């Protein structure tokens, strides 16, 4: 039975296509796009990087010149012919620029604050120049914003009540600004004087040609639209789907915007200027330069800072994201954007303001970090939550497809459902003005490297097009499931304004995975998102037609806004269970809500109502949450026994309910113990926990767990295989019905079905449950125990998936190798490359059995290509009704299998398995396995240095080999539940 017969193009991953601007050949460009389609990609995202030689970037082949527009037109034409989509980066890389900004003092260009400070003795008259700016630039007009003084009590700690406004005492002279003031006496004997200036950031990209826009001002978007209107008027690019904006990497000393002080006063009701020494965040990228002081009243500092960050977020969403989206819609496009993070902004809410929010992988593998935009995607009814997928520091040309699928599976389970692979460099020739021997200067085989062979794969340069297609077909099938309506058990409140993504697996909700391992799915939303029209409670669920959250968890919030507390009371009254962890909040989230007595009284009343509302349950710790949810009758869609690291996801349409189980490994943030096998951001995750150093443990991690599926329809259950596209009926109506010990009157009874599942780390199991209408007279519920698990002695007819036994004998006899390389010695293009026979047929002798190729012969240390293994499988008896699975232990990189001369369905490239049931017979069977490597060993023989950093060098093991944990064997498995 087919799982998905046809894969829609829109379900296929896209690829970030790194171009050397317009230094391309049209024929090669078109051919590479055709190859991308053949590999299984559904679209290209066109990006120009800083690696383009300066003479090209500034010349006639640079971004924005006529030749560039012609190049984009070629890509648009070819993608349209191939029924693919094209996305264009909004500028020549990022941050966002507009070529129409030609003056750093343009209102559309980015600005910042910088400051100076000095100490003045108390009780003295001062006549002196203002302190110098800490950050200066070679161009741009500087504007004095404010001058003030505070008493300093302890290091970086100011007395808020001591504020002196010194701005009226500054006199402008021809040469400088002079402060003339008679400072009063004070307790500390001195005054700390601050002066703040507004100035252009003067940040440029594209070989220093274009200024970065103000990301908080409408003027910045207007400058972008004026440019794009000219482009789209000439060619509307019918295949273009989106304008793409990458992560926020604009450089500021202190985040600011044109007119920010006035906007702040209008929105928050007081001036931010007296408080500039205590606002801003330091953990940003790129790193800024804020004063970093606090008040002796720490709560006051926090509340003012929250007001500042809230206005930053509002301006970013309203003036930037909304305006970009309007611009795109006017021209029949959408915006795909990696919103908010790196900057002092709220990422969860920001994701609501674009058609396609996107998260990224680079140095950010933790599940909680990947979830940050999921609630916005679901509540905002976004069709896609995109992922800049599989970016890794180092390991260029060395990432395997198993590695890729690790990233994909984690992202899917975190709520994403689309990928843009990072990435693929243009591989063709260049014969333009700056060419050297028909190439971009410095290019060598297999072609231009957008990231200098330093970061991530070029996924358009893996040697087997067919194997790439098989892998991306599997990803596309998974996308088709995960784009269906998501059902999520828990919403967790997250009120923060900076999301750098660095942290261990559960760094946003640090419960050590207890909620996940009991089966509860969760995602994060902010208090502002609860004001969405869809956030209404019906039948005890928040947004029942959407994610249908069964509860809201408030996790130890020190400050909460008045509006949120009032909303909590309404949600609880409407029947939404609310779990509140920790002590009562100590104050309002914002100074603007607490800077008057009547406001504080209103906040206290709202807190009392919300804290004591019926339906609100208070707990001391996160560890208590799963048990309390069960007691309240808030049960997950999939109940797990809590004995293994497994997470769940549920998606559904009108006819089918899909349940995904994924046995995740835990990534561990370890900044004090850098990983020697990686570098940059990735190195601060412990070795062995994230790609590329994490490896699937194999049989050692395999475990039988018990699960219960929430299923009111009692429909047929099918096991879906995304690799082959097939699914198999595994159950009729195995029902587990028992009484439950839960709180009374907590909603209608619920029906669950129980089964056992064998699963190992990094394995994903996907079930499809048929929906069908039934008339019921019975009330069903499920047993709940303290360990969130089924009673092991319940006596009911528990069914199982994946129970196996080893049968038969596998013997490999020969290995033939073919090397992959350029068709001619002088060739630099991957497009003109292929396989050719290498050496003689190798005999595989026992007892050594199988080894990685580089360990067979020292001459193979730099070999990349493919190997064809031939041998036999002997099976004494083939039992009817059983499935036969060939497990190849360790394989790198991709492989295909033939039994008795017939190719099997595309194998599972992660579990290293092929279903050979249809092909194997009793007796002796011929076996052929074709393994294709990547290009790492051919391209790297020693570490390389990039931007002053030495990249780790780890030779790859290619071929087939086995270990005790990962043996080569033939499994016999029951074909259904038993």
Image: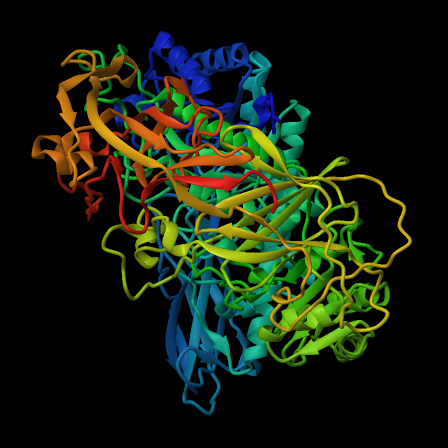
Q: Residue at the location (43% across, 67% down)?
A: 291
Q: How is the image coloured?
A: rainbow
Q: Position of residue 459 (x, y in %)?
A: 37, 29
Q: Position of residue 862 (x, y in %)?
A: 14, 31
Identify whether 875 is placed above or below 693. Answer: above
Q: Position of residue 366 (x, y in %)?
A: 46, 55
Whether residue 105 can be seen here: no
Nearer to me, 622 or 96? 622
Depicted 588 relative to depicted 931: above or below: below
Looking at the image, the residue that sits furthest to the top is: 27
Q: Is residue 142 left or right of residue 605?
A: left
Kindly tell me whether residue 725 is visible in this rendering: yes
| Quarter of the figure with residue 750 | bottom right
Q: Nearer the viewer, residue 176 or 630?
A: 630
Q: Residue 432 sits in which quadrant?
A: top left
Residue placed most toward the observer, 298 or 683? 683
The x, y position of residue 297, in whole percent, is: 56, 82
In the image, 878 versus 295, the foreground residue is: 878
């Amino acid at each position: 039975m087919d799982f998905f017969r046809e894969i829609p193009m829109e379900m296929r991953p896209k690829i970030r296509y790194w171009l050397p601007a317009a230094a391309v050949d049209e024929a090669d460009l078109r051919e590479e796009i055709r190859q991308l389609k053949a590999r299984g990609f559904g679209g290209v995202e066109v990006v120009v990087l800083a690696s383009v030689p300066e003479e090209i970037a500034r010349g006639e082949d640079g971004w924005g010149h006529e030749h560039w527009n012609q190049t984009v037109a070629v890509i648009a034409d070819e993608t349209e012919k191939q029924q693919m989509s094209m996305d264009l980066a909004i500028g020549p890389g990022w941050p966002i620029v507009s070529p129409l900004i030609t003056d750093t003092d343009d209102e559309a260009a980015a600005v910042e604050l910088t400051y100076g400070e000095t100490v003045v003795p108390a009780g003295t008259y001062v006549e002196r120049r203002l302190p110098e700016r800490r950050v200066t630039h070679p161009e741009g007009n500087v504007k004095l914003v404010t001058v003030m003084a505070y008493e300093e009590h302890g290091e970086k700690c100011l007395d808020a009540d001591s504020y002196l406004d010194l701005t009226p005492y500054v006199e402008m002279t021809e040469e400088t600004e002079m402060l003339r003031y008679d400072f009063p006496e004070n307790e500390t004997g001195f005054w700390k004087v601050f002066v703040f200036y507004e100035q252009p950031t003067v940040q440029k990209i594209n070989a220093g040609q274009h200024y970065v826009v103000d990301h908080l001002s409408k003027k910045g978007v207007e400058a972008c639209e004026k440019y794009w209107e000219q482009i789209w008027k000439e060619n509307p690019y019918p295949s273009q789907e989106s304008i793409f904006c990458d992560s926020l990497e604009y450089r500021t000393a202190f985040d600011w915007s044109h007119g920010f002080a006035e906007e702040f006063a209008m929105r928050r009701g007081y001036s931010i200027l007296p408080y500039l020494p205590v606002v801003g965040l330091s953990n940003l990228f790129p790193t800024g330069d804020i004063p970093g002081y606090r008040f002796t009243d720490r709560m006051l500092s926090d509340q003012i800072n929250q007001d500042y960050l809230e206005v930053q977020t509002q301006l970013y969403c309203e003036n930037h994201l909304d305006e970009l989206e309007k611009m795109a819609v006017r021209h029949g496009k959408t915006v795909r954007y990696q919103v908010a993070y790196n900057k002092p902004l709220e990422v969860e809410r920001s994701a609501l303001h674009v058609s396609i929010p996107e998260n990224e992988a680079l140095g950010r593998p933790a599940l909680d970090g990947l979830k940050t935009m999921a609630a916005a995607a679901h509540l905002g009814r976004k069709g896609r939550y995109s992922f800049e997928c599989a970016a890794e520091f180092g390991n260029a040309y060395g990432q395997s497809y198993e590695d890729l699928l690790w990233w994909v599976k984690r992202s899917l389970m975190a709520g994403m459902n689309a990928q843009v692979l990072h990435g693929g460099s243009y591989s063709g020739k260049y014969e333009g003005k700056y060419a050297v021997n028909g190439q971009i200067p410095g290019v060598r085989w297999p072609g231009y490297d957008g990231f200098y062979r330093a970061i991530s794969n070029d996924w358009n340069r893996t040697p087997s097009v067919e194997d790439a297609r098989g892998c991306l077909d599997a990803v596309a099938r998974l996308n088709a499931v995960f784009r269906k309506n998501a059902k999520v058990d828990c919403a967790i409140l997250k009120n923060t304004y900076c999301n750098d993504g660095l942290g261990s697996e559960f760094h946003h909700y640090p419960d050590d995975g207890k909620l996940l391992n009991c089966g509860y799915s969760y995602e994060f939303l902010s208090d502002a998102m609860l004001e969405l029209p869809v956030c209404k409670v019906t039948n005890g669920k928040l947004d029942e037609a959407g994610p249908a959250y069964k509860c809201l968890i408030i996790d130890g919030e020190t400050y909460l806004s008045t509006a949120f507390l009032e909303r909590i009371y309404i949600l609880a009254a409407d029947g939404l269970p609310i779990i509140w962890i920790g002590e009562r909040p100590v104050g309002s989230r914002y100074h603007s809500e607490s800077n008057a007595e009547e406001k504080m009284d209103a906040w206290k009343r709202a807190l009392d109502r919300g804290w004591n509302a019926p339906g609100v349950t208070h707990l001391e710790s996160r560890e208590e949450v799963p048990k309390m949810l069960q007691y309240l009758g808030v049960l997950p869609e999939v109940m797990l026994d809590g004995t293994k690291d497994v997470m769940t996801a549920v998606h559904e349409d009108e006819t089918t309910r899909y349940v995904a189980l994924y046995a995740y490994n835990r990534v561990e943030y370890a900044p004090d113990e850098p990983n020697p096998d990686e570098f940059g951001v990735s190195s601060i995750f412990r070795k062995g926990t994230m790609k590329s150093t994490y490896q699937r443990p194999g049989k050692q991690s395999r475990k039988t767990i018990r699960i219960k599926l929430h299923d009111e329809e009692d429909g047929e259950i099918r096991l879906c295989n995304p690799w082959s596209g097939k699914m198999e009926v595994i159950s009729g109506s195995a029902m587990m019905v028992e009484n439950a010990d839960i709180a009374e009157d907590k909603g209608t009874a619920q029906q669950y079905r129980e089964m056992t599942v064998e699963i190992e780390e990094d394995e994903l199991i996907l079930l499809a449950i048929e929906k069908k209408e039934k008339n019921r007279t019975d009330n069903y519920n499920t047993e709940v125990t303290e360990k969130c698990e089924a009673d092991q002695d319940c006596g009911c007819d528990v069914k199982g998936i994946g129970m196996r036994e080893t049968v038969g004998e596998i013997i490999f006899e020969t290995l033939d190798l073919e090397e992959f390389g350029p068709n001619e010695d002088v060739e630099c293009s991957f497009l003109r490359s292929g396989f050719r026979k290498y050496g003689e047929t190798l005999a595989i002798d026992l007892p050594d059995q199988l080894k990685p190729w580089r360990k067979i012969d020292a001459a193979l240390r730099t070999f990349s290509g493919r190997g064809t293994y031939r041998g036999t499988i002997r099976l004494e008896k083939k039992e009817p009704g059983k499935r036969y699975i060939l497990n190849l232990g360790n394989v790198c990189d991709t492989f295909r299998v033939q039994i008795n001369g017939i190719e099997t369905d595309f194998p599972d490239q992660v579990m290293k398995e092929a279903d050979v049931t249809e092909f194997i017979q009793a007796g002796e069977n011929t076996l052929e396995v074709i393994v294709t490597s990547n290009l790492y060993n051919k391209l790297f023989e020693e570490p390389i240095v990039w931007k002053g950093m030495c990249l780790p060098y780890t030779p790859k093991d290619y071929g087939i080999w086995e270990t005790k944990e990962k043996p080569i064997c033939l499994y016999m498995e029951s074909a259904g539940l038993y």
